[in-house]
Image (cartoon, helix red, strand yellow):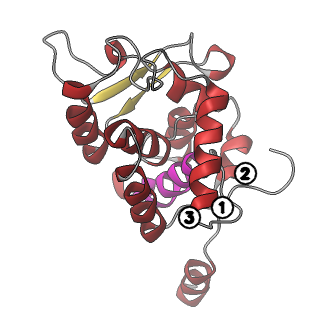
């Protein structure tokens, strides 16, 4: 990632983003867009390409994992991401009013949205919310940072975060992780 990194989304900002989504023409779809970014760490191309078959079980229920297929993933690096409860709920609410039986994030005309349209959707939202420094990558960076800060609680490692992010190198994953000055102070005080 060259240049300035996208800002991390705070819980308060996430609430504002979901409130924004609730006031759009497709509120349930737009809430899913936000949550796919922040709670699953998906890239714009993955959000645009995600299909219902990638989040549903064989018996037609919302699954407990997202199956990112190689065809929609960057560099063909598909993966499986455990489903966050709030995302699972939002997908369940979108299912009955879906605009497409194939793509989760369908345009107002019913066809799939393009990755650039997802990026533009985020640009519009962040502009309307007057949030500078945020981009379509902010949710992904937030997901990776939160996962890295909490992985020790699960007995996992940074390698697990790398796999969730679908990064080929651990160095790439490390560049996404935002530092926390307060945590650094507490850590030094423990030494």
Can you give x and y, in whole percent of width and height, for residue 42 in the image? 52, 35
> Of residues 181 and 156, which is closer to you in this image?
181
Q: Residue at x 55, y 40 (%)?
A: 159
Q: Which residues are magenta?
A: 139-152
Q: Report the Cα–Cα distance between label 3 and label 2.
A: 27 Å
Q: Nearer the viewer, mark 3 or mark 2?
A: 3
- Point 75% across, 55% down: residue: 5
> Residue 175 got which mark?
2
Dot 2 lies on which element? helix
189 or 88: which is nearer to us?
A: 88
The residue singled out by tag 3 in the image is 129
The residue at the far bottom in this view is 189
Q: Earlier in the sequence, mark 2 or mark 1?
A: 1
Q: Residue at x 50, y 35 (%)?
A: 164
Q: Position of residue 182 (x, y in %)?
A: 57, 83
Is 97 contained in the magenta span?
A: no
Residue 115 against residue 134 in the figure, above or below:
above
Please report whichever mark, 3 or 2, sits nearer to the chain's N-terminal start.
3
The residues bearing labels 3 and 1 have C-alpha atoms spaced at a distance of 14 Å
Query: Quadrant where the N terminus lies?
Result: top right
Labels 2, 1: front one: 1
Residue that lies at the very extreme toward the right in this rendered image: 3
């Amino acid at each position: 990632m060259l240049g300035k990194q996208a800002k991390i989304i705070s819980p308060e900002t996430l609430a504002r983003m979901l409130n924004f989504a609730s006031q759009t023409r497709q509120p349930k779809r737009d809430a899913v867009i936000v949550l796919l970014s922040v709670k699953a760490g998906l890239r714009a191309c993955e959000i645009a390409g995600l299909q219902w078959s990638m989040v549903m079980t064989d018996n037609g229920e919302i699954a407990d994992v997202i199956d990112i297929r190689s065809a929609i993933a960057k560099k063909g690096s598909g993966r499986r991401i455990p489903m966050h409860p709030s995302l699972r709920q939002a997908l369940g609410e979108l299912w009955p009013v879906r605009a497409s039986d194939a793509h989760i994030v369908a345009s107002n005309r019913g066809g799939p949205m393009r990755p650039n349209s997802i990026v533009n959707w985020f640009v519009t939202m962040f502009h309307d919310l007057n949030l500078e420094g945020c981009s379509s990558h902010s949710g992904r960076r937030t997901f990776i940072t939160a996962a890295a800060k909490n992985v020790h609680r699960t007995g996992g490692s940074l390698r697990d975060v790398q796999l969730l992010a679908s990064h080929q190198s651990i160095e790439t994953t490390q560049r996404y992780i935002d530092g926390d000055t307060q945590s650094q102070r507490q850590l030094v005080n423990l030494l």
